[in-house]
């Protein structure tokens, strides 16, 4: 395992941002930590890489890493080229040629001043740096947030290429369609807890939607006049059974009412 997290806890005063989560990430996997705003994804990531002091638990990280933060801010007074040169001086893992290649792929001029870049362009420049680091594991916090669909696609392809080269990617997102396209393993986080975790296909295989008048073990998804619609495990389903897509599973687990 390249990363193993056991019973990780991080509280901000009485706020239980991360409340005892455990998971493992294998080498070469793309692992997505999914969850709504405030679920605890960024805090988890920061505790793993040491930017936040954990309150409890164990983190075992077996390799070197790089990190794309949630707030993509770079030195505004520099040009992109200068920024790359500075990075080259600071990081022995950084491949400046690769970074220029990414920049071309993202249609950004290297002589542009960082202060003049749009939010999406700044993210792409930051990604050009991070993706050009030759490390074992890439921690990417919301790598495609604010990007147009074409650039989103290019970034997703770049992340896929990393995994193809045997690299490990740990990333956070709330864009389900994107996660479905690239993640091997997902953990769905809500209110500091992991509510579901596993290989995407297994999760999709595990759940169905069922409409029934009975109370069953599951997550209440919707109420109709005389029936309840639950998301539940296949073996616990009763009544009228329908397949559940990933979006429905996510919604029911995270937002769709309390566990019965
Ligand atoms: N420095 C802090 N001080 C106090 N509370 C914090 C701090 N950082 C995060 N929190 C709280 O911890 C909880 C988890 O926040 P976190 O940023 O980890 O969530 P997230 O899943 O990354 O959300 P988002 O998708 O909106 O970025 C939230 O309720 C947040 O308000």
Image: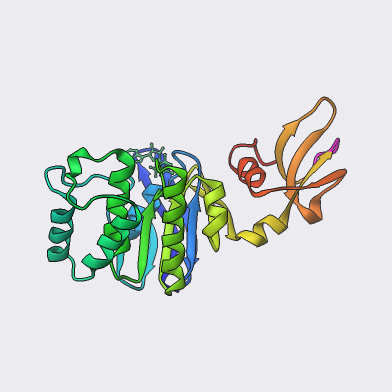
Q: Is residue 214 magenta?
A: yes
Q: Based on the displayed image, in which of its 4 quarters is residue 214 positioned? A: top right
Q: Is residue 111 left or right of residue 17?
A: left
Q: Residue 205's x, y, as percent?
A: 72, 58
Q: Viewer-proximal residue, 171 or 110? A: 110
Task: Tell me what residue is drawn at x 32 percent, y 62 percent.
Answer: 131
Task: Tell me what residue is drawn at x 33 percent, y 53 percent.
Answer: 46
Q: Viewer-proximal residue, 59 or 75? A: 75
- Main SS, magenta residues: loop
Task: Tell me what residue is drawn at x 85 percent, y 27 percent.
Answer: 226
Would residue 230 be visible to someone looking at this image? Answer: yes
Would residue 52 be visible to someone looking at this image? Answer: no
The C terminus lies in quadrant: top right
Q: Based on the displayed image, in which of its 4 quarters is residue 220 positioned? A: top right
Q: Residue 219's x, y, as percent?
A: 69, 42
Q: Is residue 224 magenta?
A: no
- On screen, 114 above or below 29? above
Q: Is residue 9 left or right of residue 204?
A: left
Numbered range of the magenta stretch = 212-216
Residue ranking furthest to the right: 239
Q: Is residue 230 left or right of residue 21?
A: right
Task: Tell me what residue is drawn at x 18 percent, y 66 percent.
Answer: 91
Regarding ligand 1, which quadrant of the image does it lie in?
A: top left
Q: Residue 38's x, y, as percent?
A: 44, 39
- On screen, 135 above or below 177? below
The N terminus lies in quadrant: bottom left
Q: Residue 29's x, y, as percent?
A: 48, 68
Q: Viewer-proximal residue, 186 or 121? A: 121
């Amino acid at each position: 395992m390249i990363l193993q997290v056991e019973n990780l806890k991080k509280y901000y005063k009485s706020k239980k941002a991360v409340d005892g989560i455990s998971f493992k990430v294998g080498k070469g996997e793309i692992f997505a930590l999914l969850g709504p705003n405030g679920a605890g994804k960024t805090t988890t990531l920061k505790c793993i890489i040491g930017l936040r002091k954990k309150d409890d638990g164990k983190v075992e990280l077996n390799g070197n890493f790089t990190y794309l933060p949630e707030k993509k801010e770079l030195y505004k007074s520099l040009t992109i080229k200068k920024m790359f040169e500075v990075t080259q001086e600071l990081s022995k893992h950084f491949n400046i040629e690769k970074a220029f290649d990414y920049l071309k792929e993202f249609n950004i001029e290297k002589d542009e001043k960082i202060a003049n870049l749009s939010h999406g362009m700044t993210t792409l420049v930051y990604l050009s740096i991070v993706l050009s680091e030759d490390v074992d594991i890439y921690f990417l916090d919301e790598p495609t947030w604010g990007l147009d669909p074409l650039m989103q696609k290019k970034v997703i392809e770049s992340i896929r290429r990393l995994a193809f080269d045997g690299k490990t990617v740990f990333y956070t997102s709330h864009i389900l369609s994107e996660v479905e396209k690239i993640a091997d393993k997902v953990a769905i986080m809500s209110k500091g807890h992991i509510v579901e975790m596993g290989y995407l296909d297994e999760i999709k295989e595990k759940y169905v939607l069922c409409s029934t008048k009975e109370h069953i073990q599951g997550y209440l998804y919707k109420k109709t006049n005389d029936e309840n619609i639950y998301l539940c495990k296949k073996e616990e389903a009763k009544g009228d059974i329908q397949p559940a897509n990933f979006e429905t599973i996510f919604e029911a687990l995270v937002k769709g009412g309390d566990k019965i």
